[in-house]
Image: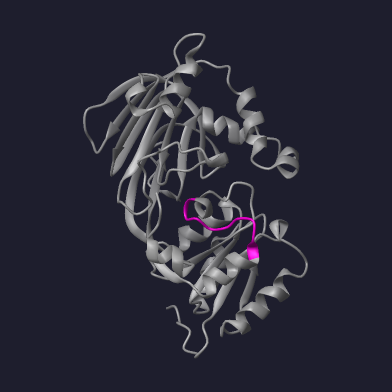
Amino acid sequence: MTQRNNGAAGLAAVVINPVKSPGDGFRDEFQSLCREEGWGEPLWLETTEDDPGAGQAREALEAGADVVIAAGGDGTVRCVAEVLAGTGVAMGLLPLGTGNLLARNLGIDVADPLGAARGILAGRDITIDVVRAHLDHSDQGQLFLVMAGLGYDAAIMANTVDGLKDRIGWLAYVEAGMRQLPGRPVRARISIDGGREVRRRIRSVMVGNCGQLMGGVEMFPDARIDDGVLDLVALSPRGRLGWLGVLAGVFGPAAARNRSVDYLAGKSAAITLAEAQEFQLDGDHLGSARHLRVAVEPGALTIRTAARQAGAGAPG
């Protein structure tokens, strides 16, 4: 049974990917910040290649942490959130990765780690939705916070050059995207909330919990992270200039949308493909699959963030 922290000062636990640490002095700076804000001595739990965050998050819960801070990239955030979802214990975001997609969608400054830490310690709680993904009819679901994808977008994640990410950041995904443009569509059947199937020949199907992706692209313009709804987009380029139709459907006005891009929304979705395609969750490439079932879990995760953000609610 988890023992909650009964001391007068709050207990923060930092689950940090040491490869992403902002500098040798950051731990000391964070400890000083905790003292300044009236918190106790924080727990400092480093992830490993074998355990990228889940075990450390469970250790933080057992220690009675009042807030568990995911310090790293989107993968670290997803591992910590998997443990915290449904517990009521708040997660803080200390964005240290390349994408930092959840942090960006919540309006957290990804360029100021210490400022983000201060916002957590002095912040308030909001609740956000999470989405559970089941791959190839598996009973074991995997949580995601921003986006899941089958096809082209996952192939980008699988083929992005790590060294290039270190040099040019998110633009490395653009380079990978250009290399992955050639390819043939696959037949897909998509059902929302158990309803009638939509049939398309697709290059990618993406399921979003919030709107903003790499480079500030609003792939899901109607998405909100706290609305109890997931948003889905299917990309179906047609002919030699098919990707131009996709661009028009994504970035053009709503009236200009065409059959190259389908937007759907609901509380659950099932996608079945004729052939296995690459699969990703929140930017982590996880292999390939032919079937994906997703369902939203409304308000399942508590986020501790700066008071101005909490007062405004989670932006979409």
Q: Is residue 157 visible?
A: yes
Who's the residue at 37% across and 60% down the image? 313
The location of residue 200, given as percent across then percent down, is 35, 19
| Residue 139 drawn in magenta | no
| Residue 111 drawn in magenta | yes
What scheme was used to colour the molecule? one colour
Against 229, residue 157 (above or below) is: above
Against 176, residue 30 (above or below) is: below
From which residue to which does the magenta span run?
105-113
**Which of the 4 image quarters holds residue 187?**
top left
Q: Which residue is situated farthest in the bottom direction here?
A: 8
Please identify the dominant SS of the magenta region.
Answer: loop
Side of 155 where 193 appears, left or right: left
Q: Is residue 41 visible?
A: no
Side of 135 where 98 appears, left or right: right
Camera-side residue: 277 or 301? 301
**Which of the 4 image quarters holds residue 50?**
bottom right
Camera-side residue: 46 or 39? 39
Camera-side residue: 41 or 62? 41
The location of residue 17, given as percent across then percent down, is 66, 59
